[in-house]
Image (cartoon, grey):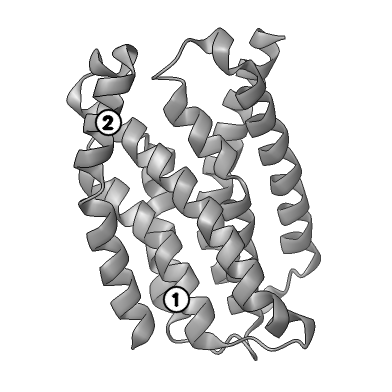
Amino acid sequence: MIEILIFIASLYLLQYSYEPVQKQLERSTPKFKELEGDKKFYVVKNLLKATYLAILCLLTIILFGPYWIYDIWPNTLLNSLASMYVSNDAIGLYKIKKLKTSTRLHHYTTIIFLMISYSLDFQESKMAKLMFLYTFASALTFPVNAYLGLRHCFDEEDLLDVCGVAYYTYAIVCFFNWFLQFYYLEQILWPYYGLISFVVYDDIVLLTWLHKKHNENH
């Protein structure tokens, strides 16, 4: 399956991107050099993910947009995009040993959803469509990952605008996404909603933290 090969290739790319990105940050940001090893991986993970998700947003719009207009849901394309997204979470679990419990559960859940999506028909399955919606919505919040990484490289007062963009982007996308997830609620999809609750919980934890940071800065 092409999507599985893309997942493996994406894992490989991300794995071997950590070291050059870390070295570049050590050369260019003195604050980053003072961090411990696991925290450095956390910063690199978020900056790589922010870049990756921004690219995924563009790819999704360019490649899937024309299909979506005609209500066509190509399995290989959508699973390939999902594989690229989830590869970030899988590498994060492998590289960073001290992830918060909510984030760890979030990442495990996305991996489970990816495995499930390989067996679904996006054209016929409402669950597959809802998973894609949540994946694309999450990709749109790439400014949050950028802020999570950059705050360990620069002083907080230099990132006030970044924090604001991250907070408002996350809030708007999350509430719109949750509304659509609830709007299409069906009893037969309770197992899906049970799993997605771990992702929603992590979103709420992070959104609450961003709200606090934004208020502190203003």
Whether pointer 2 and pointer 1 mark residues with C-beta atoms closer than 8 Å, the reply is no
Q: Residues within 10 Å of mark 1 (few under 14, many from 20)?
A: many
Above or below: residue 96 compared with residue 162: below
Which of the image's four quarters has the C terminus? top right
The residue at the point 39 percent across, 52 percent down is 107
Distance from disc 2 to disc 1, alpha carbons, whole Å, reads 30 Å
Q: Horizontal and vertical percent for residue 197?
A: 56, 53
The residue at the point 56 percent across, 44 percent down is 142
Q: Nearer the viewer, mark 2 or mark 1?
A: 2
Please report whichever mark, 2 or 1, sits nearer to the chain's N-terminal start: 2
Q: Is disc 2 placed on a helix, strand or loop? A: helix
Above or below: residue 189 compared with residue 156: below
Q: Which mark is residue 62?
A: none
The quarter holding residue 163 reads top right
Above or below: residue 206 compared with residue 4: above
Res 192 seen here: yes
The residue at the point 24 percent across, 17 percent down is 33
Q: Horizontal and vertical percent for residue 29?
A: 34, 18
Res 189 seen here: no
Q: Residue 33 or 198: which is nearer the viewer?
A: 33
Q: Residues within 10 Å of mark 2 (few under 14, many from 20)?
A: few
Q: Residue 82 or 119: which is nearer the viewer?
A: 82
Q: Name the amino acid, label 2.
A: Gln
Q: Horizontal and vertical percent for residue 1?
A: 33, 88
111 sits to left or right of 9: right
Q: Which mark is residue 24?
A: 2
Q: Which mark is residue 80?
A: 1
Above or below: residue 218 compared with residue 36: above
Q: Is disc 1 placed on a helix, strand or loop? A: helix
Q: Name the amino acid, label 1.
A: Ser
The quarter holding residue 30 reads top left
Q: Horizontal and vertical percent for residue 85?
A: 45, 61
